[in-house]
Amino acid sequence: MSSSNKYLSIAEDAVQRAKNKGAAMVEAYLLSGKELSIDIRDGEVETMKLAEDRGLGLRVISGGQVGFAFTTDFAGDGLDQLVQQALANGKNTEPDEFYALPRVSGSYPQMEIYDPAIRAAEVEKKISLAVEMENSARAFDPRVKIIESSSYQDAEIEVNIVNSLGLSASYQGSYCGLYLALVAGEGEESQTGFAIKYGLKFADLDPVFIGRQAAQRAVRMLGAKPVGTQKAAVVLDPYIATNFLGLLSPALSAEAVQKGRSLFAGKVNQAVASPLITVVDDGRLPGGIASAPFDGEGVPTSETVLIDQGQLKGFLHNTYTAAKEGVSSTGNGVRSSFKSTPEVGSTNFFIRAGEKSPEQLIKEVPKGLYVTEVMGMHTANPISGDFSVGASGIWIEKGELTRPVRGVAIAGNIMDLLGAVDAVGSDLEFFGGKGAPTLRVSSMSLSGS
């Protein structure tokens, strides 16, 4: 019996035991996963961790009351205890008519989200990728002084879900990635640089490119100085644009809207951004690190256009928030593990690429700042959209990148920033489950020296 068949049988057994004990609706979510991380320093393995996790989360719904419990014990006694605990927990919750399990009909899409080459590759090969990345960075420029972190990581998961409404499904997924953080120095000055790339295919990892990219980002900032306070165009590189996009993701959840915690509440079909901005969540995106055939409730994933050419179109839903609105789930019932119930969350969440190359975007700027680093993004308010962050980057003069800049602050509101975008790059890049292309903002206030 394959592991998926075995795990589906265990999940089915748990559902049946809960039904026998009187639960009206039951769902069993069984997750099995393993994760490998390798950290290299000066060509030697500093740490190597292999973690495995396996467990079953059980949700029972009766009379609008929801009970949840989880276990790592799949034996009969363990499942009986799990059922008892979930039913007992349910009796202590407030009834809510909108709690239900999804009725799923039809088949799921076939998706290429598991690469057997990740498991097949020997550990020595994975170590050599991190070593090669470190060597590539050092070879790029002698001013690269310290490698803070040269890491390889991969993970694989197997998801099995069964509910009492006839759902029984499973899938396998995997991903791998490289991360490098380093310091370049000259005299008394030092600057940091990093590069990161995660994907679904082991063969696509390029340690030499990532090493050079991190080194180049650090070296180009040596000699950085502040600029005076002024209004100027601002160009956000894909990583920084993705940071700002991260402010939007919680605000575009139906859960946040229903709890009065979203700056987009009441704005459906209104303009909330520049007509050049389209924001999408796509759980089926080919090559997407968060792609899967179904979400944490077994609902098929989908492409959801949230902001279309600047106009707000809707929000991300799980089964509960969708029932409250009288709409269908968008397949965004996301679970962090078997130990939690499905919350509303994003999958592959991104700003759609535009027409212009990043070089063209910069060429059209008479005076401005190409932002490559921000500090303090965690202080931004996702409910109001207000932010005030430190920024570093390269000064643009007459369409050319000239000198490095640091010690600048940019402040504003994410809605105003999105509204002022006057060009979108063709270079969409993902950093984990979120991605963006280069964005150009026509004018922002820079607080400098």
Image (spheres, rainbow, N blue to C red):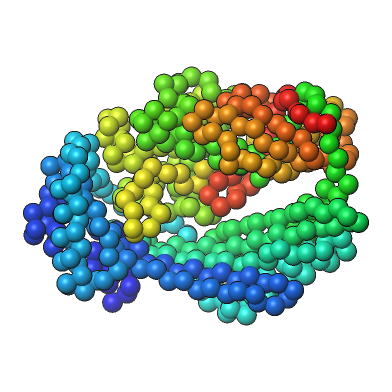
Please tell me whether residue 113 is drawn above or below residue 302 in the rendered image. below
Q: Name the side, left or right, on which 138 lies relative to 438.
A: right
Q: Residue furthest top?
A: 270
Camera-nearest residue between 178 and 359: 178
Camera-nearest residue between 42 and 109: 42
Q: What residue sits 73% from the left and 33% below the top?
A: 409
Q: Which x, y percent locates residue 328?
A: 31, 36
Q: Name the side, left or right, on which 16 lies relative to 177.
A: left
Q: How many marks?
A: 0
Q: Name the side, left or right, on which 58 lies relative to 183.
A: left
Q: Residue 324 occupies which quadrant of the picture?
A: top left
Q: Residue 168 occupies which quadrant of the picture?
A: bottom left
Q: What residue sits 16% from the left and 54% below the top?
A: 88
| Residue 51 shows in this picture | yes
Q: Which x, y percent locates residue 353?
A: 62, 38
Q: What residue sits 82% from the left and 39% below the top?
A: 405
Q: Name the side, left or right, on which 136 lies relative to 37.
A: right
Q: What residue sits 65% from the left and 75% below the top?
A: 46
Camera-nearest residue between 210 and 73: 73
Image quarter hosting the C terminus? top right
Q: Which x, y percent locates residue 24?
A: 12, 49
Image quarter hosting the N terminus? bottom left
| Residue 399 shows in this picture | no
Q: Which x, y percent locates residue 366?
A: 85, 27
Please tell me whether residue 221 is drawn above or below residue 158 in the rendered image. above
